[in-house]
Image (tube, rainbow, N blue to C red):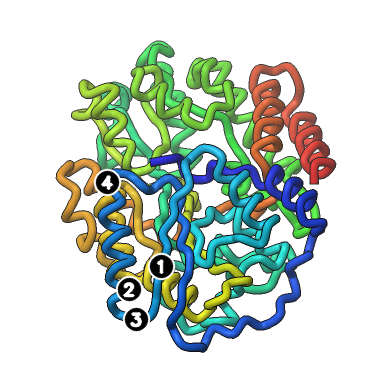
Amino acid sequence: MRKLFAASAAAIALLLSACTGGGAGGGSKQTPVATDGKITGEITFQTWSLKNDKFTPYFEKLVADFEKEHEGVKINWIDQPGDGYEEKILQQANSNELPDVVNLPETFAYQLAKLGKLTDLKSAAPDSLKDYVEGGLGAYSFDKEGIAGTFGYPWYLGTDLNWWNMKVMEAAGYTKDNLPKSTDEWFEAAKKVAESTGGATPLISSMPDLSAIENAGVEIWDGKKFTFNTDKAAELIDKYKELYAAGAMPAEALNNDYAGNANMFTQNKVGYTTATPSFVSQVTNDAPNLVGDLHATKRFVTPPLFVQGISVSKDSKNPATALAFAQYVTNNANQVEFVKLAQGFMPGTKEANANPESFTGAIDDKTMANAVDLAAAQMGEARGTTAIQFSDDMKQYLGQQIALAIKGDISSKDALDKAVDYCNKAL
């Protein structure tokens, strides 16, 4: 399965604006959509890189069951490959051929909502929203960006956990019962691990990113511009600089590679990483000798939220049918059945996350099942970034500046000032 959050919000914004002539706030005022009509007619349902031996039978049954329940309905299921989905969505939006019901990550939904391409579910079916987890709905609500409404039902979700190599941690005097539970405790543990291993297996596997800065209590976005170049944010980076100098952080951690921290863990170069519950599969495949030492705990402060959702086109010719099918795809029963196949992910419904045994029973690996239980327990707290405008390009630049600061080439405050300036100009 493809990675979550593969989209670049800035790129899609630029291309959509060029294609349609739309600008910021272009979709903030919508004409009400009639969604209370008869459920009948033909609609198109589009997924993203999910047509394969594992998932095709699920979707074929899903479509057939809905058609059987609603006489006269025809659902055309199409699937787009993992690569090029952004461009495909752009083409569809530009030609007014956006599918009636479409699988979108939050970044795509934001841009399409801004241009008035998606149905506001909060207006169309307010009662339906009560069934979904708050963080998932929040990912598709863009009030802070001046777009009132909710533009997607959370479908399948991911969140990171802390993953520890207990052999490394035990050598530094830790057990499963006294592992760090806060960022400050983690920093202290990093020093102990560096001392106990002679720097051979450091603990810190990545640089602080925007979410780490936000979790430190820094406002990163004020609704109009980025604001994370504060003294408190600089203090956070200074701590990483200190730990890097002490050998508690390997040089590879400065590469700004999203998957790099997990890869270093499986290569036994670090004793800690963050990853989703499905990380168990990666360790099993890449480093089976580490499986016995693998242990997961909840993330510090606010856990991140990775979300895929189901949105409804505002231009659907059969809006009532499209809305009903979007709700059907994302109802609790169907979400539970889906994540039994997409193991390591969680459903977007409150009911399922409150009862993870409804889907973890299908997971044979005990370590992964326990990790999914842990992730489901923190799903109510999980949140996406509060700055959806933060693009991959901005992330790359911020990482470059933080790396320079950690190495001591520039000050932490200079790094943040440059990054904020770059990001605000890029807006």
Bin the neighbour count of mark 2 within 10 Å (Cα to Cα): few under 14, some 14-19, many 20 and up. Answer: some
Q: Position of residue 304 (x, y in %)?
A: 49, 49
The amino acid at mark 1 is Ile
Q: CA distance from mark 4 to mark 1?
A: 20 Å
| In the foreground, 11 or 362 | 11
Task: Tell me: 415 left or right of 88.
Answer: right
Bin the neighbour count of mark 4 within 10 Å (Cα to Cα): few under 14, some 14-19, many 20 and up. Answer: few
Helix, strand or loop for disc 2: helix
Q: Position of residue 128 (x, y in %)?
A: 45, 79
Q: Earlier in the sequence, mark 3 or mark 4?
A: 4
| In the foreground, 34 or 305 | 34
Q: CA distance from mark 1 to mark 3?
A: 11 Å
Q: Are marks 4 and 1 in contact (CB under 8 Å)?
A: no
Q: Which is more foreground, mark 4 or mark 1? A: 1
Q: Are marks 3 and 4 in contact (CB under 8 Å)?
A: no
Q: CA distance from mark 1 to mark 2?
A: 8 Å
- In the picture of the structure, the residue carrying the numbered disc 2 is 66
The amino acid at mark 4 is Lys
Classify 40 as above or below 4.
below
- In the picture of the structure, the residue carrying the numbered disc 3 is 70
Q: Quadrant of residue 208?
A: top right
The amino acid at mark 2 is Phe
Residue 75 disc label: 1
